[in-house]
Image (cartoon, rainbow, N blue to C red):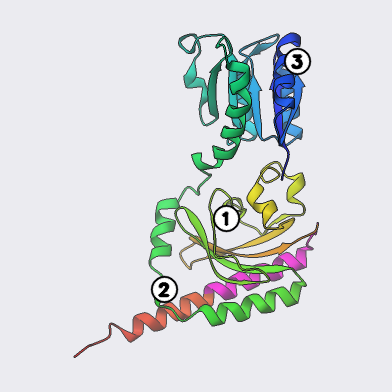
Amino acid sequence: MVEHTVLCIGTEDGVSDITATLEGEPDLAPVGRTSVADAAEFLQAESVGAVVTEYDLPDGTGLDVVGSIREHAPQTPCVLYTDVRPGDIDTGSFGDAIVEYLNRDLPDAADRLGFVVGDVIAHSAQVGFLVPDDEESRLDALESYDVDELPIEESFERLTDLITSHFDAAVAFIGLIEKDEENFLACTGADWDSLTREKTICTHSMLQEDVMVVEDIREDKRFAENQQLHDLGIVSYAGANMTTPEGQIIGQVCLIDHERRSYSAQQRAELQQFAETAMEILELRQSLLEAAGPEVTA
């Protein structure tokens, strides 16, 4: 299991109470900070599974901490653990950050805190994910390919076999990124069918023009807390965009390894060429399907 770092922010006495409460929770590793500035510095440098903050802090408020979360890792959940009433808090300042409110004056507040933190970590990925600016037209472009009717499985499997061998990689896959999940059309080295978009690294990779490489996901704050990626044995990642002739990114061709790995500029260029080949196969098969026209039945 991945141990989730929980950044706890409060006054000297307050943060001691928070960390002491969470230290007894399985899979949670509380780290204390006593100012907005120290919390912001920590968030820039480290990956955290969640943040627990008091409202009144020596150099600001818990909302300032929420602002740092929104800037550096907007999908990181935050628990506002305070005796300040919600009506006295500008909740509109939360923006895209995920904020849970827990009144610390409640009789069972300390007992509930560990449960709340564990729950928001478990469910934080469900709130959404970053999408391209052209998401609607991108999905329309993807829908124009009748993937279920195209005989591409064997061609793509041969291609992922070749990619795995060429790069001496543990896993290679070709995936189409749909509205809520990435479906793998071919996968060599693993038996993967799909991943939800909030869990797959390709959600981030597709936003980059060039090949995206993550040498070690354990050192990347976007993925260090992603339990599903760890369960799959993913350590390093490289992904290249599959782009339609009209410029819509509909999928990825990716490499996975179970150990830290880097890729040279030449290797990145070669991976992009494989992605272009996959797109050309898809285009050719779609053109042939359309040329054949609808079947005529008696």
Is residue 91 found left or right of 211 in the rendered image?
left
Q: Amino acid at mark 2?
A: Asp
Nearer the observer, disc 1 or disc 2? 2
Q: Amino acid at mark 1?
A: Met
Distance in Å between CA atoms under marks 1 and 3: 42 Å
Question: Which residue in the protein does label 2 denote?
Answer: 148
Q: Quadrant of residue 292?
A: bottom left
Q: Position of residue 152 (x, y in %)?
A: 50, 79
Could you tell me if the residues under marks 1 and 2 are in contact, i.e. CB atoms within 8 Å? Answer: no
Q: Secondary structure at mark 3?
A: helix
Q: Amino acid at mark 3?
A: Ser
Question: Which residue in the protein does label 3 denote?
Answer: 16
Distance in Å between CA atoms under marks 2 and 3: 57 Å
Q: What residue span does the magenta drawing correspond to?
A: 260-279
Is residue 31 found left or right of 123 in the rendered image?
right
Q: Is residue 141 visible?
A: yes
- For the point 73% across and 50% down, the residue is 217
Q: Secondary structure at mark 1?
A: loop
